[in-house]
Image (spheres, grey):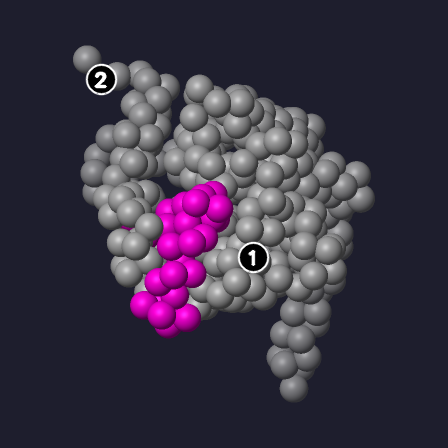
Amino acid sequence: MTPFPQKQKIRGIGKVFNNITTITAAAGGFMGAFKPLYWFFGKCMEGLMYLFDQKYFLALIVFTVLTRLVLFPLNLRQQKTMAKTNRIQPKIQKIQKKYNVNAITDPKQRQKANQAMQEEMQALYAREGHNPMNMGCGPMLFQMIFLMGIIGIIYYPIQYLLNIDIASYQDQVAKAIGFEASRGNSYLELDIIRNISDYKEILLSKSAQFGNIFTESSVEKIARFKEGLNLFGLDMSQVPTWTDKIVIIPILCLITSIGSTIISTMIQKKNNPAAAQQQSQMMIMMLAMPLFSFFIAFRLPAAVGFYWIISNLVAIVQQLVMARYFPPKRNIAREMIENTIERRAREESIKNVKNK
């Protein structure tokens, strides 16, 4: 028997989660391509930390809010695109009903009808000035880029926040402090920060082997930075586990991500009741991202999860603001007016050409 669609979706999500460990294990080399982004984000965070008296998490909160503000125009554009799609949806359904391709059993006739339907669809898109391929993937893409940048400066704060050039001496430093090579160099800087009091004498005594990058002042800088990585008694450089109180970070990631998803769904249902049934059927897939963030939060330092929590909270506020001040219905009305003006201008232009 063919599995039910919902079961297929659940199995698909399960396969994604099963492959996450493999993907993250291979990410070390891939993340190297983002070094320019790490440098840029590091400079931004360094400036914010200077403004906020080296308060790391206050700087991270402000940085997260600023990145969300940068994304706001893209989110607004995406909403306008969706509003345009909803506006012409009845016309699309009318064309689909007219040809009823799925009811045609003869392959040749079905192909002919499908081609005619696609041509009429393209004509509709041309009249309405709508590109169905331009559905606004920009916000999601930029969010992923920002996330990669945040991960970089959290994993490599000695390089990109404290400006200590450890990159060229990673193997020598790891060997000197007895860092397990099997853990990968991605965790080296975090390990040094967490255990700086134990490593201090080793780093200073063997500083010549590391290009004299570790001096009394640089080691003191690392020690001060370590103090700033503690939030409410939680070491945010630590990777969360179920047996430690820092497990609250993945849990809050899950809760805030689900909250953002639910609010987004409620707003969409309110503005587009016709899609309510379809959205209910897609709820399992919509919950995939919250579950993904929950799972990943156990694989990365807690500071990444903290960024995710703040990002989700800002996203919730942003969604409520957009629903209040930029409602889709208003966008649809504005779109209809603009489309009518544009169409009349084209018709007038064609008449003038003919009269000449």
C-alpha separation, residue under disc 1 versus residue under disc 2: 64 Å
* Residue at the limit of the structure toward the top, as seen here: 1
Horizontally, is 217 left or right of 27 in the view? right
Residue 354 placement (x, y as % from top left):
62, 79
Residue to which mark 2 is pinned: 2
Q: Is residue 214 above or below residue 239?
A: below
Residue to which mark 1 is pinned: 220
* Residue at the limit of the structure toward the bottom, as seen here: 356
Q: Is residue 34 above or below residue 276?
A: below
Q: Is residue 225 above or below residue 246?
A: below
- Magenta stretch, main secondary structure class: helix
At horizontal 27% and vertical 59% (from top left) the residue drawn is 171
Number of numbered discs on residues: 2
Residue 324 placement (x, y as % from top left):
79, 39
Q: Where does the magenta region start and end?
A: 184-212
* Most foreground residue, 310 or 47: 47
The residue type indicated by label 2 comes to Thr
Q: Secondary structure at mark 1?
A: helix
Q: Is residue 75 visible?
A: no
- Which quarter of the image is occupied by the N terminus? top left
The residue type indicated by label 1 comes to Glu
Residue 355 placement (x, y as % from top left):
67, 82
Circle 1 or circle 2, nearest the eye: 1
Residue 59 placement (x, y as % from top left):
67, 52
Disc 1: CA contacts within 10 A as few (<14), some (14-19) or many (>=20):
some
The part of the image, by quadrant, that contains residue 180 is: top left
